[in-house]
Amino acid sequence: MDVHRFERQIQFILEIDKLKTVLRRTYLIHQDRSENTAEHSWHLAMMAILLAEHANEPVNVSRVVKMVLVHDIVEIDAGDTYFYDTAAALDKSHREHAAADRLFGILPPDQGQELRELWEEFEGGETADARFALALDRFMPQLHNYHTNGRSWAEHGITADRVLERNASMAAGSSKLWECARSLLDDAVAKGFLQSTKEK
Amino acid sequence: MDVHRFERQIQFILEIDKLKTVLRRTYLIHQDRSENTAEHSWHLAMMAILLAEHANEPVNVSRVVKMVLVHDIVEIDAGDTYFYDTAAALDKSHREHAAADRLFGILPPDQGQELRELWEEFEGGETADARFALALDRFMPQLHNYHTNGRSWAEHGITADRVLERNASMAAGSSKLWECARSLLDDAVAKGFLQSTKEK
């Protein structure tokens, strides 16, 4: 075995400790702080295990788990690009590909390539596994927002029509999750903590 | 399908958001704060994927990943029991079993039973998958302690002989990880941030 193989694996494991310091726009339900990307990735993996039966198409649960564990590692260099930030979205792909080069490049080549391909598959959203993983990634913030009385939506001036438009592709991975998300949004509007549309 | 099945799954997913608020004794490498159990679980899952080739026996990587994702969920009710706290260890099993009853009981019975059995298998340490998962769980704090100059060891008066004694079972899951851990300990002692034995 390559003498440096183990050293490269350990170096990567130390490097990804940084994902715990990348903050998202969502807030925890039971504590007054922003969620970080490492704990978010754990939460998605648990959802993949528990909700796979609600995927529209049959999925390989182990692959989806692996995919969501890895899906945001590029944020260590590229930062968390807010889902509703259209300006930041313009160079997101460029920033994230450079991050992928550096980060997955730390690993032994076979493992780096495997994780990179999983990340690219997730980003591409062209397979059943990726469609379901993307649906989970879009569904989770709806749960967090709903159960924190729309705090992050309010802070960023996000309205229900915007949420619906940006998240509609959730339905391609799971009609069930999309149906649930829409009913949470309706309820958030009814309860008054989410505006339905931008006021003129 | 049971009409309450999806509701129970979502209730569990919301409940385990609390794991992000359970603090461990380890410190992050790149930020001055304690690690929480959710992000720790993500990190172990990444290690399971990357280091499986260093398990002593062949393991089912997907099962190990699932096992480490779930292995500390009981801490939501039972808290994190410090690995070197012999007094707290006395009722740890009792506290954690009560936690498992409540938490896994939120899920649909088939899923609750599956996760509970994985947790019990981990705790038992009698299978190849559990031995490797336990080795990862013991190895990770050595990395964190070493790369934060022994901060948590110092705070709790932990000496190298104590670390060696409490972690020797790591070798049953992975001789390679145990060998690496021992060399980190030797180096920590040599560098003067870990005492070798308790001063008389």
Image: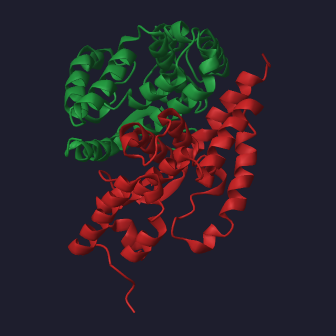
Chain colours: A red, B green
Identify the residue at horizontal 59%, vertical 12% (top origin).
B178
A110 or A155: which is nearer to us? A110
Residue farthest toward the bottom in the current orientation of the protein: A200
Rendered position, B104 above or below A3: below
The answer to whether A134 appears left or right of A142 in the picture is right
* Image quadrant assignment for residue B123: top left
- Residue B12, relative to residue A154: is it above or below? above
In the drawing, does residue B83 fall left or right of residue B30?
A: left
Give A62 or A174, whichever is nearer the viewer. A174
Question: Which x, y percent locates residue A105?
Answer: 75, 40
Image x and y of residue A96, in percent: 68, 55
Q: Is residue A45 left or right of residue A8?
A: left
Q: Position of residue B171 (x, y in %)?
A: 55, 8
Establish if A114 lies above or below A174.
above
Residue A133 seen: yes
**Residue drawn where x is 74% and y is 37% of the image:** A106
**Quarter of the picture holding the N terminus of chain B:** top left
Q: Is residue B3 above or below residue B72?
A: below
The residue depicted at 26 percent of the width and 24 percent of the height is B96
Q: Is residue B31 visible?
A: no
Q: Residue at x 67, y 18 (%)?
A: B187
* Residue A40 rendering spot, x and y as whole percentages: 45, 47
- Label count reads 0
Q: Is A22 on the left or on the right of A50, as rendered? A: right
